[in-house]
Amino acid sequence: MGELVRPLVPAKTNLIKRAHAIKPFKSIADLGACWGVNGGYTFFALDQYPLERAHLVDVRITDVTRAKAGAYRNLVLHQADFRQPRVAAEIGPVDAVFLFDILVHQANPDWDDLLRTYAPQTEMFLLFHQSFTASRKTVRLLDLGLEEYLRQTPYKYANDSEKIERWFRTLDEMNPRFGVRNRDIPGFWQWGVTDRDLIMLMWSLGFEVEYMENYGGWPQLPSFENHGFIFCKRQTVETMAGTREATLAARFSA
């Protein structure tokens, strides 16, 4: 399943272009970069800009990715769990961190802990994620129960209900691959993260929203929309009133 080759999403490549126009980056870390696109956004940035260093990180580096990576001397492959602080330390400081379709999957460490891990070593986050719009507060989707979980997430509509039912029956069993209980493995939707909570967390970490966009959602998933963000460390952009963050959050949570 790791060898899927899907086309790049224009919304994500446009985020990369816009971010580079805001503050040109020389180094990047693309977290969870392989599944479906085989490092496609890393390679896009490498082909578009004169990067000094690019880090491509995933728990499995696909053969397609490795074959293409050989042409890039400034690319470092990390087959590792990017959620772990030791992996972040191995990557080191970078100008920009790409997190595309990542936050919804992060549990133990949770999505907010992941952002806290990388915040000290970057100037910019590029985020494309499935934003939860059904409440003002972020929710752990498992807490909704099996029936509501299936209603809120894509698995029922992808005919994967049986897989989710099996997962729910084994939530408290240890997963040897990840060293956590099955309830916390990243292969499933874990969180409904609201824009308000995301923006406020990033503000507390020293970042402000430089750009955000609503790319819409899916008729069968009325509680989620695809939203894109560029967060810049505050000292790297023109200082603006603190109320800007609350205004932007209200734009999507009203």
Image (spheres, rainbow, N blue to C red):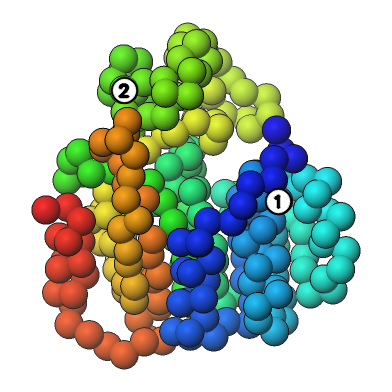
Residue labelled with disc 2: 151
Amino acid residing under circle 2: Arg
Sequence-wise first label, 1 or 2: 1
Left-right relation of 192 to 88: left
Circle 2 sits in a helix, a strand or a loop, which is it? helix
Whether residue 81 can be seen here:
no
Residue labelled with disc 1: 38
Q: How many marks?
A: 2
Say above or below: 64 vs 28.
Answer: above
Depth check, front residue: 148 or 110: 148
Depth check, front residue: 236 or 254: 254
Q: Which percent across, then down, holds residue 149?
A: 34, 23
Task: Identify the residue shown where x is 16% and y is 66%.
Answer: 246
Say above or below: 129 vs 235.
Answer: above
Residue at the outermost left position: 254
Crowding near the residue tagged with mark 2, few <14, some 14–19, many ≥20 C-alpha atoms within 10 Å:
some
Task: Identify the residue shown where x is 35% and y is 15%.
Answer: 146
Q: Which percent across, then down, holds residue 25?
A: 57, 82
Amino acid residing under circle 1: Asn
Q: Which picture quadrant has residue 178?
A: top right
Task: Identify the residue shown where x is 36% and y is 21%.
Answer: 150
Left-right relation of 131 to 25: left
Q: Which percent across, then down, holds residue 242?
A: 18, 77
Task: Identify the residue shown where x is 53% and y is 24%.
Answer: 181
Crowding near the residue tagged with mark 1, few <14, some 14–19, many ≥20 C-alpha atoms within 10 Å:
many
Circle 1 sits in a helix, a strand or a loop, which is it? loop
Left-right relation of 147 to 97: left
User: What's the distance in space between the residues labelled 1 and 2, CA to CA?
Assistant: 30 Å
Whether residue 219 can be seen here:
yes
> Which corner quadrant holds the N terminus?
top right
Depth check, front residue: 48 or 180: 48
Residue at the outermost bottom position: 238
